[in-house]
Image (cartoon, coloured by chain):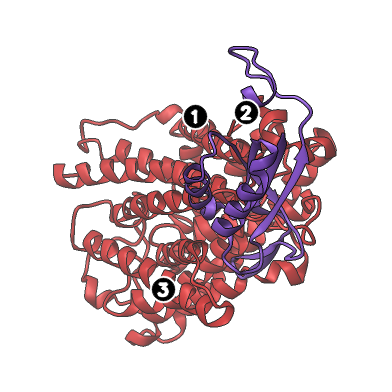
Chain colours: A red, B purple
Amino acid sequence: MESGSLAWVLISAALVLFMTPGLAFFYGGMDRSRNVLNMLMMNFYCILIVPVVWVIVGYSLAQGGTGDFIGNFDHLFLDGLGIIDDNGAQIATVAFLGMFACITPALISGAVADRMKFSAWAIFVPAWLLLVFVPVFKWIYGGWLGDRGSLDFAGGTAIHVNAGIAALAAVLVLGKRAGWPKEGHPPHSMPLVMIGTGILWFGWFGFNAGSALAANGQAAQAFMNTFLAAAAAGLAWVIIERVRDGHATNLGAASGIVAGLVAITPAAGFVSGAAPLAIGAIAGAVCCYAVRVKNKAGFDDALDVVGVHFVGGLVGSLTIGLFANPDFFGPGAATSPASVCTSCEFKAGLFHGGGLNLLGEQALANLAAIVWSFGVTLVIMIVLKKTIGVRVSEDTEAEGLDFAEHAEVAYH
Amino acid sequence: MKLITAIVKPFKLDDVKAALVASGIAGMTVSEARGFGRQRGHTETYRGTEYELDFVPKVRIEVVVEDEQVSAAVETIVAAAKSGKIGDGKVWVSPVEEIIRIRTSERGTDAV
């Protein structure tokens, strides 16, 4: 890897790391004041445990070898990865992908907010990382789904659909918050939500443009797409709110921005022109309605991980089947943020002469990820529930998790 | 001596304070309060879901005055705090048995 690209990948990795604290503030502000520190800690815990697990075994299982379904143990403790032959490309990539591994389980924290035991979360995160994130990541980046020709530039399916559907499985086992939905749980600090949103958007340029794994034209287009899709999605969300409910809200803008960022993630390096505006607007509008489904369906996805990340990721991933434009990117464009994906192919979408083939592959890839993630997450949560328990006591839930679980109080 | 307690809209606090000071009141105690009256709270909307909040933010102003100052002070507060809209708040007056200035141990009207 030449030095310009290496510099961009290293900077991108740091940008992606920053997204986890950003997510913590985004979620923490939406939480109630007596649970905000628990929410921050659930997120920060991910950047404590995941790098350790990632380096010991996670990366090797996610990327080692050429298996269709799972990696191998060749790179335990990063064994065999040098810095001399490739100017640090592999090590930089392991770090970059490790940041993705950190934020993926962190996304789930928004769904289980206000009621999950921290000890259960502490075990859930590494278990989920190895049993769900790692295999799905391998399928898409160097396994059977990638080989079939499905596309996922920066993790729409591998990260957002994966974590989003896991969030649904987790809350089905965990149960509803006391009082939900009768009793309202409004955000305790909208300024914190907006700060978190800003950090997420900033970090997302590393997430998407960094996934080109090079400082090149594809990275520039991914950067532009990330910029546009978030704006279009935020705009779509607040316009719908203004017309439907009478007010354009901060939370609507923030939610739309995140929905747009999620949706453009799988498509960032594959689409151009007006496509990011269309993808963003569709995601903003669809997610604006999707967040209401939980009230009718009766699952307490506290901070709308399903409505924003699962639905947004699905929208983005499927629209690749329409908008993917290989001619714009030319030969040699990257198809994934992983270094070993040699057989991945960049097919054209329906609107660029590719027919329905890519759309079908996108649907299959998401279906596979959904089935695995939902099923295995359900099993992990049920095992935790039967052993150490997943839910705090009624007293703790009423008094707040901050003091009961962490002996700290956010505001005095 | 009487204790005047006024519950007013937060953004009216500065007006009430200025009017009371201009009318010669020497001090007051202010605290943040939440509550509802006939207006019954308000509705906030987050992600399209409406939340009924029973307790709306108010400011509580407490002033101890001599008996002959009461009616003027109450009128000053009412005039300054009135917007004419629902939720303007309330003022009530209660008797005070004793008052002591801690620094000097003065009692009664000397301590007001």
Residue A142, image x, y percentages: 43, 54
- Residue placed at 56% from the left, 45% from the top? A28
Q: CA distance from mark 2 to mark 3?
A: 57 Å
Pinpoint the chain carrying mark 3: A
The first of marks 3 and 1 along the sequence is 1
Above or below: residue A292 compared with residue A123: below
Query: Looking at the rendered structure, which numbered label has been put on residue A52?
Result: 1
Secondary structure, mark 3, is helix
Pinpoint the chain carrying mark 1: A
Mark 2 = which residue? B112
Closer to us: A339 or A288: A288
Mark 3 = which residue? A235
Label 3 is placed on what type of residue?
Leu
Label 2 is placed on what type of residue?
Val
Q: Residue furthest left?
A: A3
Mark 3 or mark 1, whichever is nearer to me: 3
Residue A300, image x, y percentages: 73, 58
Above or below: residue A82 compared with residue A313: above
Quadrant assignment, res A388: top right
Residue B75, image x, y percentages: 62, 54
Discs 3 and 1 carry the same chain letter = yes
Secondary structure, mark 2, is loop
- Residue placed at 45% from the left, 34% from the top? A74
